[in-house]
Image: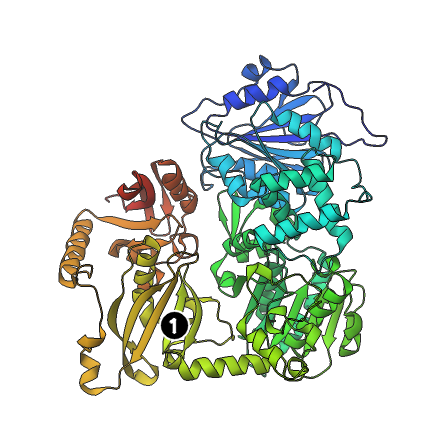
Amino acid sequence: MTDSEEKAPGDRAIPLVVIGASAGGLVPLERFFAHAPDSAGWCFVVIQHPSPDHRPITDAWLARKTRLAIRHIEDGAEIAPDTIFLNRPDTRADLQGDVFRTAPHAPEDPVPYRPIDTMVASLAPRAGGKTAAVILSGAGRDGAQGAQVFHAAGGVLVVQDPAEADFPSMPQAILTLGIHDRVAGAAEIPQAIHEIFGAIPKPAPEARPGTEDIFLAILRLLERQRHLDVSACKETDLQHRIIRRQHLRGIEDPAGYLALLRSSPEAVNELYHDLLVGVTGFYRDPEAIARLRETALAPFAADLGTETPVRVWVAGCAGGEEAYTIAIELAEALRATGNPRGFRIIATDGHQPSIERASNGTYPAAALRKIPKPLRQRYFERRGEDYTIGASLRQRMIFSVHDTLTDPPFLDLDLVSCRTFLIYLREKAQARVISMFLFGLRKHGVLLLGPSETPGQFADDFETLDGRWRLFRKTSGPRVLAREGLPRRLTRRVPGDEAPGVPRGQAAPTLSRRASAGPGDYAEHRGREALIRTTEHLLETYAPSSIIVSSDGEVLAWFGAAGALVDTPNDLTEWSVEHILHRDLHFLINRALEKLRGGAMVPFSRRVTVDLNEGRQQGVTLHFEPLDRHREPLLLLIRVRLEAGGEEAHAVDEARVTVSAGHEEQPAELSRLHTETESLLTILDIGLLVVDARLNIRRFSNHVARWFLLEKPDVGRSLSVAGPKLSFVDLPAEVTRAIEDGAVFSGQGMTDSGPLSLEIHPIADQRHGGQPDAAFVIFRRPTR
């Protein structure tokens, strides 16, 4: 690669490369700068994650490796060409435009610090230009959170090949998210960036004559390998994204790119994420949010005549920022009026990693810049360099993978927000989506669309509240969906239908084939509700009383008398065990799920007494058995038998408790072992918390329950949601390091109850070569 590049006329922006490195970063940085241009006008920013066991990178060391100018980041300094900027220890730095902003870390700030996350997230406004982020060797996950923000804005991410890195955790964290643009050895990364920067100034060319078949082959490949049906999307937008990804790979010929996709699962994954990831942000278009509150949220809050929770659907929620913004504004509106009315926000997206990020609810500080400080303090918790949505808001949110085009709409909605999705769809597909929203909205419900979107052919069903910000109120009453408005999986298959196949790889369901046997206008006249009512009636009549739960704790369905133990005030089935099942069932079900996830699940039964209303008690026998052990997510079937009373309330029918005698736990022995362990921990004045590889709470001691107000239902819940909230340590991050890297952590700090010390130790799984699969978190209160 030459040291000079021709700049396009008028292209005055300085190309910027931000490099994140930690443990093991010296060697890859030396290789990187040995091949980086020193007179091409690029600016380099090297951000080091603090690593106590490894020598930091100094300007003197770096000066021996490159002819580039070397400076430390100072507050107010501007980026400069042919210069390397180094961050200072114990200082937080980010970019605002071309200007660095810094602030010292205070002694009371939570640790570990995440300077790479902070800097990379601040690059989001520069995405789309000549700006790239590079993640090199390092332990932990610093950089992953900021990379998601940068990628969602269209930024370029290049990752060192983990096979080359001495500490592969940081690069691997990006690869696991699937948001990278290139993977290369440290010496090859400058050339990869050169190729990417060379493609960026060029507008994506129009498709060449004769390339239509190639684009069609690419789309068919995506449908076959990733079950992605994009038939409803605009062809020009699809081609633009495919060509952009092709150029980022340094390939000029579409046929060459197709050949790469056929041979490289990694390239397929890159394109898949490019086609699905949406752009969003907190308080995007603040004026639109203000008008939404004024015209819709404030009237909801002012309605003191109903206790029915406000129901909101945010379709195409991407990373969750829009959904949380609406939640904050709705909570503030209710708070201002003193209305105790609750609300539920259902946020959906077709992109699984986006839903996982949204559900986690953790964002770097740079992502929260538009949120007023009082709202940040009220609705977020500071954890190191990041902010996490507080429990009071998070418990009102439901995040779910959902295909707006093909999955059934949610019902009884007061508000639908969809501001990043319709613009990519063809006119017919847009009409289908709007008909779904219209079907799900209550009369007088509100619809919020993007700035360039309208209700189209359904304009007569709405009145305009704000034409500029596309706010509409439904004025029509209940309606039946037209056939073209039905999700494909609920309609009969007809030769010549536009969309090729059923999304997510599902075969045409039996229900659809039966519909085709009826009168031709059956689906149009009966609609979705008739089909669902018929199916529910068959299940209620013939299915055994039971509950189906996924291995991650989501309640998928229930049948028969088991419904007496389910509380569904919001008419959804994708809820957690803790949210909708009777509290007296939580402990047993979470234990069964732990066995299911651990692969040691055999059928067993237990009896439990549940407290019903007005002091009544009901005996219940639960029989647990796994379903389909070979596909994720694993499923747990819980057969439910409600006891009639009398003698049956005090004994379990032994003939119905089918347990393998060779595998059944011995209750007395386990009880004695538990008692002895608790006694020992009490004598030693130690609190013990066990966390599994999914960062779910496996078990905890009495001290931990008392110190941090944990209860039995918290078993199986996420550590970040239900675990201790400590200001001096990022507990989920350190547990992740212990499990992934085998690292042992110790620290101490102050809590509301006084000083506390803790240690985190990995737990080796001897069944898998001694690799850690869980961690002990040990708490001690210093002796007074």
Q: Position of residue 687 (x, y in %)?
A: 26, 50
Q: Residue at the spot x=53%, y=40% of the render?
A: 175
- List the single residue furthest toward the top: 64
Which residue does the numbered mark 1 point to in the structure image? 547
State the residue in front, 535 or 137.
Answer: 535
Q: Position of residue 517 (x, y in %)?
A: 60, 80
Based on the displayed image, in which of its 4 quarters is residue 94 positioned? Answer: top right
Q: Residue at the spot x=34%, y=50% of the render?
A: 691
**Disc 1 secondary structure class:** strand
In the displayed structure, 708 sits above or below 516; it is above
In the displayed structure, 11 sits above or below 511; it is above
Circle 1 Cα neighbour tier, 10 Å, few/some/many (<14 / 14–19 / ≥20) = many
Residue 339 visible in the shown view? no
State the residue in front, 430 or 360.
Answer: 430
Q: Residue at the spot x=81%, y=32% of the render?
A: 11
Q: Position of residue 18 (x, y in %)?
A: 62, 31
Q: Quadrant of the C terminus?
A: top left
Q: Residue at the spot x=77%, y=32% of the render?
A: 13
Residue 599 visible in the shown view? yes
State the residue in front, 8 or 749.
Answer: 8
Q: State the colouring used for the structure image.
A: rainbow
In the displayed structure, 326 sits above or below 13; it is below
Q: Quadrant of the N terminus?
A: top right
- Using residue 732 as the reference point, say whether residue 40 is left or right of it: right
Based on the displayed image, in which of its 4 quarters is residue 470 positioned? Answer: bottom right
Tally of marks: 1
Based on the displayed image, in which of its 4 quarters is residue 223 positioned? Answer: bottom right
Query: Which amino acid type is shown beneath numbered disc 1?
Result: Ile
- Using residue 307 as the reference point, say whether residue 778 is left or right of it: left
Q: Position of residue 550 (x, y in %)?
A: 41, 62
